[in-house]
């Protein structure tokens, strides 16, 4: 049997870059269009897992393809923080995260050629230093965190504002590589 082709259910360039770190290049990219609105009372871990599974399930696969989907959710306690759609939202998010620990929950889902669904979820604790208004203003002005969960990108300028990380650094970026590699191998994707 030939090795399966990988479909990445994400248009995120960060996820493609992360996969490249482990020597994986998707054969194609699919951008599933799903409703990402949290359900009433939904907890962050359940939300991230539901979205990863929904993204994977929304992709039509050929007979020789497997799909990988992921979702990264930033949570403050039980509260799911939205992506920073504009500077005002980003400023508010950074103010909430300033001087506090929060969780980055990253769920991944792989569906193999037989339709078997495999999932993993990681939780990483991240703590920002206490941010001054000037630091928030400078970060917002950089444009870096727009569109990103929690309003920041740990792989960029924000890393210098983070005093503590416990868990999967790649998971905070968007794809926990240790768990991703294990799921791809289990699904028959060739990795050394």
Image (tube, rainbow, N blue to C red):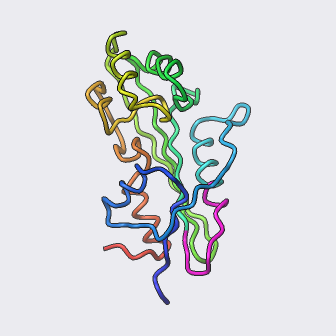
Which residue lies at the image location 67% right of the left edge and 36% below the top edge? 38
Q: Please tell me in which quadrant of the rendered image residue 46 appears.
A: top right
Q: Residue 145 or 65: which is nearer the viewer?
A: 145
Residue 138, above or below 112? above
Residue 163 appears left or right of 74: left
Instruction: Count up the numbered dots.
Output: 0
Which residue lies at the image location 41% right of the left edge and 46% below the top edge? 171
Residue 48, above or below 1? above
Quadrant location of the C terminus in the rendered image: bottom left
Which residue lies at the image location 69% right of the left edge and 44% below the top edge? 35
Residue 1, above or below 160? below
Residue 179, given in percent of the width and then of the height, sits at: 42, 57
Q: Residue furthest bottom?
A: 1
Q: Which residues are magenta?
A: 55-66
Residue 167, given in percent of the width and then of the height, sits at: 36, 41
Residue 161, above or below 131? below
Q: Indicate yes or no whether the magenta region holds residue 174.
A: no
Which residue lies at the image location 72% right of the left edge and 36% below the top edge? 39
Residue 140, given in percent of the width and then of the height, sits at: 40, 22
Q: Residue 89 or 114: which is nearer the viewer?
A: 89
Residue 18 appears left or right of 108: left
Q: Indicate yes or no whether the magenta region holds residue 62.
A: yes
Residue 118, given in percent of the width and then of the height, sits at: 56, 63
Residue 81 appears left or right of 143: right
Q: Please tell me in which quadrant of the rendered image residue 132 appears.
A: top left
Residue 143 appears left or right of 34: left
Q: Residue furthest top?
A: 133
């Amino acid at each position: 049997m030939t090795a399966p082709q990988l479909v990445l259910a994400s248009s995120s360039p960060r996820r493609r870059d992360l996969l490249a770190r482990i020597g994986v290049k998707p054969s194609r990219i699919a951008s599933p269009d799903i409703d990402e609105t949290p359900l009433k009372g939904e907890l962050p871990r359940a939300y991230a897992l539901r979205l990863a599974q929904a993204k994977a399930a929304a992709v039509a696969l050929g007979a020789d393809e497997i799909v990988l989907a992921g979702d990264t959710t930033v949570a403050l306690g039980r509260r799911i923080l939205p992506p920073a759609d504009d500077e005002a939202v980003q400023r508010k998010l950074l103010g909430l995260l300033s001087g506090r620990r929060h969780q980055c929950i990253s769920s991944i889902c792989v569906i193999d050629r037989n339709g078997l669904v495999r999932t993993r979820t990681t939780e990483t604790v991240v703590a920002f230093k206490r941010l001054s208004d000037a630091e928030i203003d400078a970060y917002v002005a950089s444009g870096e965190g727009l569109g990103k969960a929690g309003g920041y990108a740990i792989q960029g300028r924000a890393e210098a504002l983070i005093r503590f990380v416990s868990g999967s650094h790649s998971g905070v970026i968007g794809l926990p590589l240790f768990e991703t590699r294990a799921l791809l191998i289990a699904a028959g994707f060739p990795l050394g």
